[in-house]
Image (cartoon, helix red, strand yellow):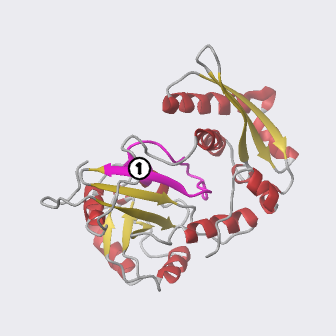
Amino acid sequence: MDSSPEADSLFRSGFVSLVGRPNVGKSTLTNRLVGEKIAITSDKPQTTRNRIMGVVNLSGAQIVLMDTPGFHRPRHKLGEMMVRVAQSAMRDVEVIYFLVEATSPKPGPGDKYIAEFLQNTDIPIFMVMNKIDEVYPDRLPEVIANYQELLPVTEIIPVSAIEGTNLDTLLAKTITLLPEGPQYFPENVVTDQAEHFLITELVREQVLNLTRDEVPHSVAVVVDEFEERDNGMLYVRAIIYVERESQKGIIVGDKGFMIKEIGLQARSEIERIMGIPVYLDLWVKVKREWRNKEMLLQNFGYTLPDDK
């Protein structure tokens, strides 16, 4: 994807933060722009819990994306941490992508809350109107007009992250706002996430996809053992933590069916991304109220950003 301006010999680089309500498609857009899956996706709100960095390499430019948790009203310390992560990711960036949904005809309370938070920033903002593939084209101008009143932005750019519609335009306009700068990452690097983190996220993704109700939100995954063995197979032992015994029973399932299915789907995805055979050994343990205990949050990899 070549989106660099012609006749501009400068190498441009910079950081872009993606913000928005839960489930507006921030992770889907990140994966599409990067060209590889670096962030898990699901139809459950608050899927993204950490800041996920993705690198977009273009001719004459490098864009470093920061996918963030969705802005929401927190109900526990984990939720508070997620909102703080989203807020902190908007510091020291060149551009902000404020994602909204074309499927919502008018801005909702969550959009208005984020717009209020962005009111005083001097960072250029693109309102990225996602999911235009789900809206009749003749309805789009009315939706855009409704969102224009929400916040003064540099531009509203309608896109479809799923189908890739208008993403070249989004990248080209982004590059024009980037300063001359270095290549922050080698061209073969697409994320700063460690393999351990990616594996925990891929396991959690399957829990999100295969379970229901409150169970997905009560789950944390930790890699307990990670070893590439002499036979070329990667052995991974991961622990799925939940808050209640009843949740453990759901994840294990009748005669272990659910935990086997989670393992099967996660292992297939890990092997596809890492390119080597994987033996995935999953266990389920209960840690009551872990979402409200800062020490456990840190142990599970949910670190709070520094307040500056």
The image quadrant that residue 228 belongs to is top right
Task: Say which quadrant the C terminus sits in.
Answer: bottom right
Query: How many other residues sit within 10 Å of disc 1, few (<14), some (14-19) or many (≥20)?
Result: some
Q: Position of residue 114 (x, y in %)?
A: 52, 76
Q: Which residue is mark 1?
A: 185
Instruction: Residue at 65%, 69% (x, y): give it.
Output: 306
Q: Which residues are magenta?
A: 30-57
Q: Let me know if residue 154 appears in the view.
A: yes
The residue furthest left is: 7
Q: Secondary structure at mark 1?
A: loop
Q: Nearer the viewer, residue 37 or 103?
A: 37
The image quadrant that residue 232 belongs to is top right
Instruction: Residue at 41%, 49% (x, y): give it.
Output: 185
The secondary structure making up most of the magenta span is loop
The residue furthest top is: 231
Q: Let me know if residue 25 appears in the view.
A: no
Q: Position of residue 188 (x, y in %)?
A: 39, 40
Q: Is residue 296 above or below residue 252?
A: below
Counting every numbered tag in the picture gives 1
Q: Nearer the viewer, residue 68 or 63?
A: 63
Instruction: Residue at 36%, 44% (x, y): give it.
Output: 187
Residue 36 lies within the magenta run:
yes
The residue furthest front is: 182
Instruction: Describe residue 214's horizontal placement relative to residue 167 as left or right.
Output: right
Instruction: Residue at 53%, 67% (x, y): give it.
Output: 89
Q: Is residue 301 above or below residue 122?
A: above
Q: Nearer the viewer, residue 48 or 73?
A: 48
Residue 278 lies within the magenta run:
no
The amino acid on which the numbered mark 1 sits, given as a three-letter code, is Phe
Q: Position of residue 52 (x, y in %)?
A: 53, 54
